[in-house]
Amino acid sequence: RTNVAFGGAFPSDPTALTDTGIIANETSIDDSDSAPSFGFGALYRASETLSVGFNFVKGPRFTVSETQHLNPGFPDFNSLPLIEAVGFPKDVAINVPNRIGVGVAYRPVPRLLVGIDAVRIGYSSLVEDFTLIFDFGVLTGDEYTIDDVTEVHVGAEYNVITGSSPVFIRAGFFTNPNHSVRFNGTAPPLDEDTADVERTVYNSLPRDAERRGTVGAGFALGLNFQVDLAYVIGRDFVASAAMRF
């Protein structure tokens, strides 16, 4: 993060700001950790055309060390060698969310498969053991929350070419509800300036749910090689290949 110079017209002109390019502070994580995780699922085939599935994944929990360095000269617009801030390094918890999902697949005709599933994702675990790197001295970490969300996925696959090298075309739709960090602290017990800063940083951006369509295709070359292509409309292109031995 770099230091900002306030122009003579500030604050009446809120754009009268200049980036000085002088480093104020920086943080870094150069660490590794390992943690266990597990998942299980079940599939019930009700008939030749209908099946129901369930799965649960327990997310791992990692702890890594983060360090903050400060430029002691930045208040006076000077570039001095960075020094490690008091109280660092700090442990940072990375609690990967748990996931639980149910889905239904239906094959109305032999070449067409339609599926729908819903997945509950426990994003609230990300703010458990919340570590404050830039600490104003009045925050505890309990003021920050993330909502758990439910994603919905709908898709269909049609087998356009059969035989030893089949070709499939696919289309689908999914939702991605917003799960950004939210600041819920109030003044009092916080001072109003701190509460205003944190509300501006965390609560002022749009929180719309994302809804995306997808299209794709899959190709199997004999019994051993497969290629899958997918396009998330307006966002990503994904290609994957698999070889069976």
Image (cartoon, grey):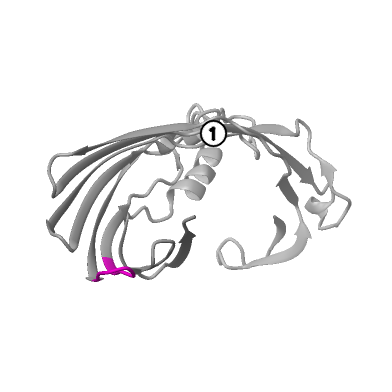
Query: Is residue 163 highlighted in magenta?
Result: yes
Residue 144 horizontal/vertical position (percent)? 48, 35
Q: Residue furthest right?
A: 81
Query: Looking at the image, which is closer to me, 237 or 217?
Result: 217
Residue 136 horizontal/vertical position (percent)? 63, 35
Q: Is residue 113 left or right of residue 85?
A: left
- Please report the residue visible at 48 percent of the width from the left and 60 percent of the height from the top: 243
Q: Residues within 10 Å of mark 1 (few under 14, many from 20)?
A: few
Place residue 77 in its image quadrant. Answer: bottom right
Query: Looking at the image, which is closer to me, 108 or 146?
Result: 108
Query: Looking at the image, which is closer to me, 122 or 81?
Result: 122
- Please report the residue visible at 55 percent of the width from the left and 39 percent of the height from the top: 194
Residue 186 horizontal/vertical position (percent)? 45, 33
The amino acid type of the residue labelled 1 equals Asp
Residue 30 horizontal/vertical position (percent)? 73, 44
Q: Which residues are magenta?
A: 161-170
Residue 97 visible = yes
Q: Is residue 23 left or right of residue 140?
A: right
Q: Is residue 47 above or below residue 216?
A: above
Q: Is residue 153 above or below residue 232?
A: above
Residue at image mark 1: 191
Q: Is residue 216 above or below residue 58?
A: below
Query: Is residue 73 highlighted in magenta?
Result: no
Residue 7 visible = no
Element at badge 1?
loop
Q: Residue furthest bottom?
A: 161
Q: Quadrant of the N terminus?
A: bottom right
Q: Is residue 139 above or below residue 201?
A: above
